[in-house]
Image: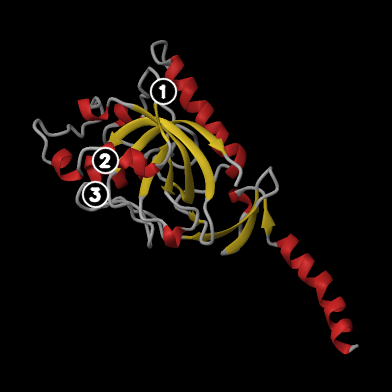
Amino acid sequence: MFRIFLLATLLPALATAQVADTIVRLDEQTSDRAFLKLPNGALYAVEMSDEADEDSLSFETIARRSALQSCVTATFTGVVRRKAKTSPLPGRAKSYETLDDLLDELPSDSSMRFRTPRIDTSPFSERVEEERHNVRIKRAWLFAAFREEDNDFHLIIGNHEQPSQATALMNVEVSGLPEKTASNRRAHQTLLEARTEFIKIFGDTQCRRTFRFPEKGVPVEIKGSLFFDTHHAGTGTGSGNLRPATVWEIHPVTGIQWLSN
């Protein structure tokens, strides 16, 4: 009888605690851990951390932080390969069932890192031949989200629902927006739509905060243009145990679809 009474007493408190710890956008999160509720009703445990993927090259970090629009607008404020990062390729995307299928076709990091000629890292650097492909991954899982100081949303996706079982990881970036001009209106609109879709689900999250989904990833379909992050070649990207073995990216993302389990 006492056990029944105790359980009946605790249930309302537990329900209240769960409701209090449930958010519908990442920018609502104030505690280290919460449950994110997506529009389809699915709940995902999410952890917030100040452990950011810091840029290892100081001149880029300084440039980002000195920009007046850093972390407060949607404008891209980065320097390295700015044109390539904010210029989606025209044309159709090649579809891949899984992340593994895409990674199996990409040139090795070492061949890209030491290719001839080397990849130019200046702001007006164009995509090299190996990057001139649009791709679509039909199903992957989102494990982490982080807003960088250049106003990109940096996402880590994997090939398995549970992060601990994922053997392949990749960085994909929902880009900050280029300055809108008469010549890039279509590209600007494409990037704006992708950014709006991300923010609709996750919110316009704070800069330099990492959100991880430690128990299971959010299923997504991702589309965008290939990009080799030569700026981080040899050092890698990511944080904690979510560090892709490659610095190949989808950057910029041009389409996101949130899938059901």
Residue at coordinates 11% horizontally, 36% vertically from top-left?
115
Which amino acid, mark 2?
Asp
Which amino acid, mark 1?
Glu
Q: Earlier in the sequence, mark 2 or mark 1?
A: 1
Q: Which mark is residue 5?
A: none
Residue that mark 2 sits on:
229
Residue that mark 1 sits on:
179
Drawn side of residue 6 relative to residue 200, left or right: right
Q: Earlier in the sequence, mark 3 or mark 1?
A: 3
- Residue 138 drawn at (x, y percent): 47, 36
Q: Quadrant of residue 127?
A: top left
In three-dimensional space, the C-alpha distance between marks 3 and 1, rounded to whole angstroms, equals 25 Å
In three-dimensional space, the C-alpha distance between marks 3 and 2, rounded to whole angstroms, equals 13 Å
SS for tag 1? Answer: loop
How many numbered discs sit on the rendered protein? 3
Mark 2 in CB contact with mark 1 (< 8 angstroms):
no
Q: Residues within 10 Å of mark 2 (few under 14, many from 20)?
A: many
Q: Is residue 212 visible?
A: yes
Q: Quadrant of residue 8?
A: bottom right
Which amino acid, mark 3?
Leu
The residue at the far bottom in this view is: 2
Q: Nearer the viewer, residue 162 or 172?
A: 162
Drawn side of residue 251 relative to residue 34, left or right: left
Q: Earlier in the sequence, mark 3 or mark 2?
A: 3
Residue that mark 3 sits on:
57
Residue at coordinates 57% horizontally, 39% vertically from top-left?
258
The residue at the far top in this view is: 182
